[in-house]
Image (spheres, rainbow, N blue to C red):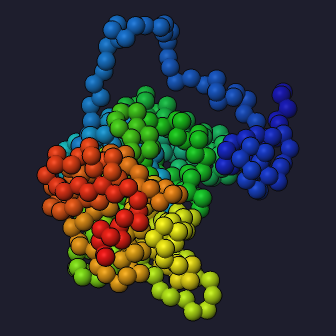
Amino acid sequence: MAKIKSVYTCQTCSYTSPKWLGRCPDCQTWNSFEEGVQEAKPLATKSISSGQSSPKTISSINIEKFPRFHTGTKEFDRVMGGGITRGSLTLIGGEPGIGKSTILMEVCGKLLENNQVKKILYVSGEESESQIAQRSKRLGITSESFYIFHETRWERVLESLKEIKPEFLVIDSIQTTVSGQLDSPAGTLSQIREVTYELMNQAKSLGLTCFVIGHVTKEGSIAGPKILEHMVDTVVYFEGDQHGQYRILRSIKNRFGNTNEIGIFEMGESGLREVENPSQYFLDQSLTESFGRSLSCIMEGSRVLFVEIQALVVENKFGTGRRVSQGLDNNRVALLVAVIDKYVGIPLSYNDIYVNIVGGLKIQGREADLSVVASLLSSYYSKPIPQDFLFLGEVGLTGEVRSIPMMESRIKEAAQMNYKKIITSVRAAKEYKGKMGIEVVGIAKASDLKSLLFF
Ligand code: TYD
Ligand code: MG
């Protein structure tokens, strides 16, 4: 009999080592190694393709159309690439408590309501049957074809799949489901890999459409992310501000559609509601005459979102000023403050500076730079900026205003939403002036904002 060998696997990046290591040499994570048994057959040799195949030219291949289920929730269908592809396996990731179980339960309800599927099995290792039933009542799901199963053992799930024969399956969550084939505890990399692999095989052979929930770690990645993401057809993340109401569903990988699409939802008393007019969702129209605020617009996938950037500049009499920013990178704000200091000639180093994106949104790009500068100046001079101005541009280290991508979509949407003036780079202004039914003003330097807006 072959000797059983132990192998230690990094739970973050799946690096393996014959010895326990304190720190992973590959991804540098501390304390991430778990002991497991070396599998007799390496998973890489397992194959899901059956029979013989040979290389073909494109024209000789029959292109299959992928039939889809439509939930009727526009935002959800859109993120999935125009509906859920039949027979596909989707991973939905997100922090605990963000609403993954809720959204999938609502999807189940819609699919049954719209007669898209006949039977659904919802397997939860996380909550008891009565907890799930209570939630589904609250969400208004009463269908008799909705089966709930509290189970963590994969073998039992498989039996019930064969017995009930659902067309749609939800596993809540991958971290609580265990296969009896392995000794390692639930949630370890080898368990996650094994269960996902089994699931994928069964889903393909039974023609099941399947959703798997995966919790993300504090660092923001699904445990064993690489492996899961490789194996499934579609990966979507559900994110948002736990304390705020909005949630964003974002597609990261989609074998059957566009990635980078987002859908915006709002968490309410009776579950999630899709947001009707997302481009304006993050704005608060009520404070017209206040200073220290300006508007910009950012792109999320192909979607335009208008955002409000607020700044507060107050004199600090006791030394070095504080810098606090929410929703924006602190270093980016520091850079823009330095640009104002140098090129507008305002000694901002003696001021406390606070910058905030309204609605709890986070901006990663540099598309809102010019708007940040405008808000800072508006706060410093205590002079408001008109509500129907938009600032679109990146600001460089010499204070120059640069163009940002996808200007056409942004300007089009701005014109539709009745904004009056766009302040942007000289280059973008040249290109779009007089073309889109909205005034486009180009400035070469961020310091030109002072004379344009205030003095
Ligand atoms: P849940 O779907 O359990 O999150 P996850 O599966 O991602 O861990 O949802 C969690 C939160 O949503 C919970 O704190 C309660 C809240 N919630 C509502 O506000 N309204 C509702 O109708 C429902 C069902 C949940
Ligand atoms: Mg849950």
Foreground residue among 216 and 307: 307
Q: Which residue ends up furthest to the bottom in the rendered image?
A: 317
Q: Quadrant of the N terminus?
A: top right
Q: Is residue 147 visible?
A: no
Q: Is residue 319 visible?
A: yes
Q: Quadrant of residue 440?
A: bottom left
Q: Is residue 114 left or right of residue 160?
A: left
- Which residue is at a point 51% across and 52% down the rendered structure image? 214
What is the x, y in percent for residue 373?
42, 68
> Toward the viewer: 147 or 298?
298
Residue 424, quarter of picture: bottom left
Q: Is residue 180 above or below residue 107?
A: above
| Horizontal side of residue 281 vs 256, given as left or right | left
Looking at the image, residue 109 lies above or below residue 314: above
* Residue 5 x, y percent position in the rendering: 83, 36
Residue 106 rendering spot, x and y as whole percentages: 30, 57
Query: Residue 323: x percent and y percent?
Result: 55, 77
The correct choice, above or below, for 138 with respect to 104 in the image is below
The residue sitting at 27% across, 36% down in the picture is: 68
For the point 56% across and 23% down, which residue is it? 47
- Identify which residue is drawn at 37% across, 82% down: 381
